[in-house]
Every structure is written in C-alpha cells, then in structure tokens.
Image (cartoon, rainbow, N blue to C red):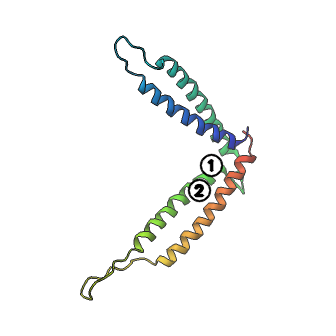
Amino acid sequence: MKLAEALQERADLNRRIAQLRSRLINNALKQEGEEPAEDPAELLSELDRCTEQLEAVISAINLANCRTKVDGKTLTELIARRDCLTMKIQSYRDLIAEASCTAQRATRSEIRILSSVNVKELQKNADLLSKELRLLDNLIQQTNWLTDI
C-alpha cells in the first residue's frame, strides 16, 4: 500500500467514526416499549473495529513519515515545515488585509489612519512563502504516492 492510500484510508476511517458517533448518540435513548432504530451494541462493536483499524493506519503513516527521507529530511520534518509555512502565510495575509484598510478622511481636520507596515513588501514576502509552500506540498504529495508502507 502506498502512503497516499493510507492517508485516504485514514480520512475515510475518521469520517466513518464520526458517523458512528452520531448514530450512537441518536440511538442512546428510546421510548419505553419501543426499540431504537439501530442497535447501540452493534454500533459500538463497529466503532471498536474502526478505531482499531485507525490506530494501525495512523501508526503505519507515522512510521513511514519518520523513515522516509527526501532531500535529507524526513517526511515528518517536511510536514512540520508545511504546517508552519501555512500558519505564517495566513498571519501575513491577515496583516496585509488589515494594513490595507486605511480609513478615508472627510475633512482635513480628521485623524489620518496610516498603515504601520510596508504592505507591498509584506505581499512580496507572502507570495514567496506561498510559492515555497506550493512546491513543498507538491513534493510531499509526490512522495506520498511513491512511498510504500
């Protein structure tokens, strides 16, 4: 199995577990003399099977990420870099959006609101970081499809 397939399986199992949790909650109570729409014991059994599968898949993914090296770095390190780049880019974008909203004055006596940062330079940096993120994400995706677990 390829790492990318394991990642898809993990996502499927997470969705399945969320559905099972919802179905369990919907069938937790019943009216006296009535039966629930689904047997909670069967749902719990299926939940147990799914969480055991998820645990195995997550372990396999994490082990593959730790042992797979690309350009001298593990996939774990590349993923951490991608996550931090994403966070940094979002912070830049938020600052750019806020700094770009300078208030207009109706009269010369009103207080002027000015940007405290160089928006053009920040935008240039955000664009460079975004390019790095795209290239890094492509490398991670490519590696996921080439790596056996």
Q: Is residue 67 left or right of residue 119?
A: right
Q: Earlier in the sequence, mark 1 or mark 2?
A: 1
Q: In the rendered image, which residue does mark 1 sit on?
A: 76
Label 2 residue SS? helix
Q: CA distance from mark 1 to mark 2?
A: 10 Å
Residue 83 percent across, percent down from the top left: 55, 54
Q: Is residue 102 left or right of residue 123?
A: left
Q: Quadrant of residue 58?
A: top right
Contact between labelled residues 2 and 1, with CB atoms less than 8 Å apart: no
Above or below 56: residue 93? below
Above or below 26: residue 96? below
Q: Is residue 123 left or right of residue 117?
A: right
Furthest residue in direction left, as rendered: 109
Which residue is found at the position 30% from the left and 83% from the top?
A: 105
Callout 2: 10 Å neighbours few (<14), some, many (20+)? Answer: some
**Amino acid type for the residue under numbered disc 2:** Arg
Residue 131 percent across, percent down from the top left: 62, 66
Residue 82's tag is 2
Q: Quadrant of residue 72?
A: bottom right
